[in-house]
Amino acid sequence: QVQLVESGGGLVQPGGSLRLSCAASGSIFGINVLGWYRQAPGKERELVATFTSVGSTNYTDSVKGRFTISRDNARNTVYLQMNSLKPEDTAVYYCHAYLSPRHYWGQGTQVTVSS
C-alpha cells in the first residue's frame, strides 16, 4: 500500500504562485511513475506533470514554462511549483503514483485562481 498526502493548495490571484507538496509513505520502493493530475469542474481528470518510469519529466502543454515538478527522495516528497497562474488552472490537484500493478491517488487539494 502507498499513501499520498497533498498540501499547499489555496486561493491565489492571477499571475501568482503556489507550491504543492505530496508526501508518499508506505510501500514506496519501486514507485516508477510519480506526479500530478488535476480535475476542473465538469471536466475529466488530466495529467499536469509527472516523472516517467525512465526518470524524465512530462508536462501537459498548457503548463509548460510555468509549472515545474521536482522531488526530494530523502523526504519521499514530490513538489509542483506553479508560477504565472491563470484562472483556467483552477482545479482539484491530485498526486498520483504507479506501483505495478496499481495506481494510487491522494485526496486532492483545491487550487483556485481568481481576483
Image (tube, rainbow, N blue to C red):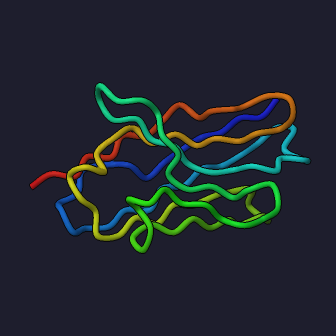
Residue 2 lies, in percent from the top left, at 77, 34
Answer with left or right where residue 20 lies relative to residue 70: left
Question: Who is closer to the viewer here, 54 or 23?
Answer: 54
- Name the residue rendered at 85%, 29% in the picture: 101
Against 13, residue 112 (above or below) is above
Q: How many numbered circles are shown?
A: 0
- Name the residue rendered at 57%, 65% in the picture: 69
Give the quadrant of residue 58. bottom right
Give the quadrant of residue 66. bottom left
Give the quadrant of residue 1. top right
Image quadrant occupied by the C terminus: bottom left
- Name the residue rendered at 76%, 39% in the picture: 98
Residue 91 lies, in percent from the top left, at 34, 40
Against 115, residue 68 (above or below) is below
Answer with left or right where residue 31 lies relative to residue 14: right
> From this viewpoint, which residue is outermost toward the front?
61
Residue 103 lies, in percent from the top left, at 73, 31
Against 66, residue 12 (above or below) is above
> From this viewpoint, which residue is outermost toward the bottom?
65
Question: Who is closer to the viewer here, 59 or 7?
Answer: 59
- Name the residue rendered at 62%, 33% in the picture: 105
> From this viewpoint, which residue is outermost toward the top?
42
> From this viewpoint, which residue is outermost toward the right?
29
Residue 48 lies, in percent from the top left, at 50, 51
